[in-house]
Amino acid sequence: MAVNIVSFAYSRPETQWGISRAQKYDVRPLPNPHSIPALRPLTGKHPDVQKFVRDSVKFSVVMGPILARIRDGDFIAFGCHGGIHRSVACAEILAVTCRERGFPYTIEHHGLDKS
């Protein structure tokens, strides 16, 4: 088994294919890196965007419970407005947690891959 991780955009329905059975998490409450000019051209795959998201005071509230209870075989989908920054960063952060815990995983960024 593997943990299946997906990021998507709430604003673009075409990025939501294949996630109907996933545990969906809305990460729009996290601050949006799009509002920072230096981060706007980057994606959530970039370490600076991940740091911005992780350093948010809301990060532990939104992501803490997910990171604490992740199990092999879970199907987790993160959504934000554009599917480029926050959802991608959260998916990448979860992937690191999976690696650290020895869980195999797959990761797809529907907002990046299908834009």
Image (spheres, rainbow, N blue to C red):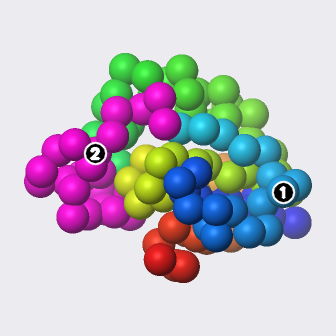
User: Is 109 contained in the magenta span?
Assistant: no
Main secondary structure along the magenta-highlighted residues:
loop
In the image: residue 43, left or right of residue 16: left
Q: Is residue 94 visible?
A: no
In the image: residue 39, left or right of residue 65: left
Residue pointed to by mark 2: 33
Q: CA distance from mark 1 to mark 2?
A: 27 Å
Q: Amino acid at mark 1?
A: Ser
In the foreground, 34 or 59: 34
- The residue positioned 20% from the left and 53% from the top of the image is 39
In the foreground, 11 or 98: 11
Q: In this rendering, is residue 69 above or below 92?
A: above
Please report contact status of discs 1 and 2: CB closer than 8 Å, yes or no.
no
Instruction: Give the numbered dot on residue 20.
Output: 1
In the foreground, 58 or 104: 58
Q: In this rendering, is residue 104 above or below 52?
A: below
| Residue at disc 2, secondary structure | helix
Q: Residues within 10 Å of mark 2 (few under 14, many from 20)?
A: many
Residue 11, x across and y down, in percent: 53, 54
Residue 100, x across and y down, in percent: 58, 52
Q: In this rendering, is residue 42 above or below 24?
A: below
Highlighted range, magenta: 28-49
- The residue positioned 56% from the left and 32% from the top of the image is 63
Residue 88, x across and y down, in percent: 48, 57
In the foreground, 86 or 100: 86
Q: Is residue 10 visible?
A: yes
Query: Which image quadrant for residue 69?
Result: top right
- The residue positioned 34% from the left and 28% from the top of the image is 56
- Quadrant assignment for the N terminus: bottom right
Q: Amino acid at mark 2?
A: Pro
| Residue at disc 1, secondary structure | loop
